[in-house]
């Protein structure tokens, strides 16, 4: 980033002159305000060592210029050298006991150290002595926000709104604070207040849609995005999020139209193509899905989701060899992705690579000893290979981590019945029915022949009657 992006031409010129002086090891004259500008330049670029060197240079020329001490304290706060910052601020306070900037910085130090009561005291003094109260309120709010103290920040944004009810930025920031703590109701409240002030505020409508989406209220989210698009039909980020909301409602055809419009407006990116591919996949349009996943992978070869999606399209066509190489590419990019590993293991097994599949299941359980899907899938591999005792042992291990998992009990019914341990099998069926009656159908999906076992049917019927 060029310093000219945020500082004036005069400051840029002073920086160049200062750096030339440093390179040539000469001495040049700068007034105190010019040196302040140079320090700010380095602070903005996060060149803190150079900023401190500029402070030292300023102190040599102007040893009693208090602003340099405060600037040094500001750098120390950024570097989290809080003791050094307080030393500089205490010195400055001896000479300028009513300087609001030093009280603001002392408050920031206290916030970082979670001494919030002390921080409030310093912030009150900063407000007492400042000339621009609203600016100071924003500074204090951001100090809390930067340290994740969102409710303290919210209090100051509320003060700003009380004093300037039409100040748009304060509403956004306040809604954002509530959003970050998961209080979406309050977030909606302030976004709606902003819309009441300015009904054509496209940003407010957009944020309203995003918040509704986080609440799972996808219909309301779509309505908000539609208002946003009515104000500005080219607001593509709103259209993209509307498409995502439509996907959540399983309205894939409508989502496709929105994603295509986003691609038309923006030229398309890997995420848009990937999301579009997902819609085509859900619509059963496998060839179209693969084309979009491939576009996504070409645009971003490091997007694991795209390679995985390509693999899924091949798997749906029973082209398991083609699927396998793409699943492996996805796992190479995201080796800890449990979903990818589960599907890869299944594909390895279907292609006859039993050892490789079992190694993946073992890795999954090592990653997460309580992963239900890994235990169920691995045990089914064992069961299918005739290693039924090993299948049972795996599920027993799973039960150690989650004794309330009804899927384990239903599966144990199947495995134990196959071993001829009918009484034990029925005991596990009873536990499963107690935990979750509705999922009893899973037994017959795995072992349809158990539909002929009267003891099993009678036990299920007895629990069905109890459900009524």
Image: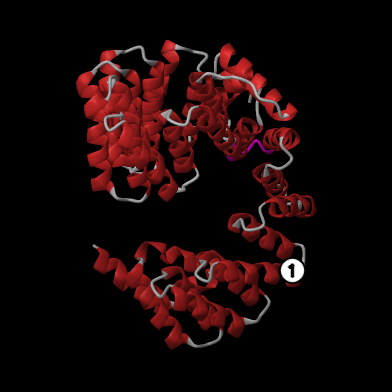
Q: Nearer the viewer, residue 95 or 105?
A: 95
Left/right placement of residue 285 relative to residue 428 reads right
Above or below for 22 versus 327: above
Res 310 quadrant in image: top right
Is 367 included in the stretch rendered in magenta? no
Whole-percent x, y for residue 192 in the image: 28, 23
Q: Quadrant of the N terminus?
A: top right
Question: Which residue occupies 27% across, 27% down?
Answer: 190
Whole-percent x, y for residue 458 in the image: 36, 75
Which residue is denoted by mark 1 in the rendering?
A: 356
Res 384 quadrant in image: bottom right
Left/right placement of residue 2 relative to residue 463 reads right
The reply to whether residue 183 is visible in this rendering is no
Structure colour scheme: secondary structure
Above or below for 319 versus 396: above
Is 283 included in the stretch rendered in magenta? yes
Most prominent secondary structure in the magenta stretch? loop
Q: Nearer the viewer, residue 387 or 467?
A: 387
Region of the chain picked out in magenta, as a range = 282-286
Question: Which residue occupies 53% across, 29% down?
Answer: 58
The reply to whether residue 53 is visible in this rendering is yes
Whole-percent x, y for residue 429 in the image: 41, 76
SS for tag 1? Answer: helix
Q: Quadrant of the C terminus?
A: bottom left
Above or below for 70 versus 341: above
Whole-percent x, y for residue 228 in the image: 41, 18
Q: How many marks?
A: 1
């Amino acid at each position: 980033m060029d310093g000219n992006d945020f500082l004036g031409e005069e400051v840029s010129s002073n920086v160049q002159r200062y750096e030339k002086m440093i390179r040539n090891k000469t001495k040049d004259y700068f007034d105190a305000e010019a040196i302040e500008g140079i320090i700010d330049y380095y602070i903005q670029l996060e060149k803190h060592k150079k900023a401190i060197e500029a402070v030292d240079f300023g102190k040599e020329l102007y040893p009693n210029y208090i602003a340099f001490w405060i600037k040094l304290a500001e750098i120390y706060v950024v570097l989290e050298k809080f003791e050094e910052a307080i030393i500089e601020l205490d010195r400055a306070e001896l000479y300028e006991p009513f300087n609001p900037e030093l009280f603001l910085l002392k408050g920031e130090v206290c916030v970082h150290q979670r001494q919030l009561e002390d921080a409030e005291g310093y912030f009150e003094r900063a407000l007492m002595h400042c000339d621009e109260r609203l600016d100071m309120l924003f500074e204090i709010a951001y100090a809390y926000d930067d340290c994740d103290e969102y409710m303290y920040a919210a209090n100051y944004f509320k003060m700003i709104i009380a004093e300037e009810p039409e100040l748009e930025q304060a509403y956004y920031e306040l809604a954002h604070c509530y959003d970050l703590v998961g209080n979406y109701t309050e977030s909606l409240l302030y976004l709606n207040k902003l819309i009441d002030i300015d009904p054509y505020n496209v940003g407010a409508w957009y944020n309203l849609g995003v918040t509704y989406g986080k609440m799972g209220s996808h219909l309301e989210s779509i309505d908000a995005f539609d208002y946003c698009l009515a104000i500005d039909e080219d607001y593509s980020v709103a259209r993209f999020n509307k498409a995502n909301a439509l996907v959540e409602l399983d309205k894939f055809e409508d989502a496709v139209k929105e994603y295509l419009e986003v691609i038309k407006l923006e030229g398309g990116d890997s995420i848009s193509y990937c999301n579009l591919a997902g819609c085509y996949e859900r619509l059963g349009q496998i060839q179209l899905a693969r084309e979009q996943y491939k576009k996504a992978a070409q645009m971003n070869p490091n997007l694991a989701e795209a390679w995985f999606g390509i693999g899924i399209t091949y798997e749906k066509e029973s082209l398991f060899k083609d699927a396998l190489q793409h699943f492996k590419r996805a796992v190479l990019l995201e080796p800890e992705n449990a979903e990818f590993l589960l599907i890869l293991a299944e594909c390895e097994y279907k292609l006859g690579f039993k050892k490789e599949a079992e190694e993946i299941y073992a890795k999954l359980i090592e990653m997460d000893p309580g992963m239900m899907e890994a235990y169920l899938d691995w045990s089914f591999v064992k069961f299918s290979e005739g290693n039924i005792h090993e299948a049972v042992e795996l599920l027993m291990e799973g039960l150690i981590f989650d004794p309330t998992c009804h899927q384990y009990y239903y599966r144990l019914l199947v495995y134990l019945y196959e071993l001829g341990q009918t009484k034990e099998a029925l005991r596990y069926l009873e536990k499963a029915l107690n935990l979750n009656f509705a999922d009893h159908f899973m037994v017959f999906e795995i072992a349809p022949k158990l539909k002929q076992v009267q003891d099993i049917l009678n036990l299920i019927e007895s629990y069905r009657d109890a459900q009524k």
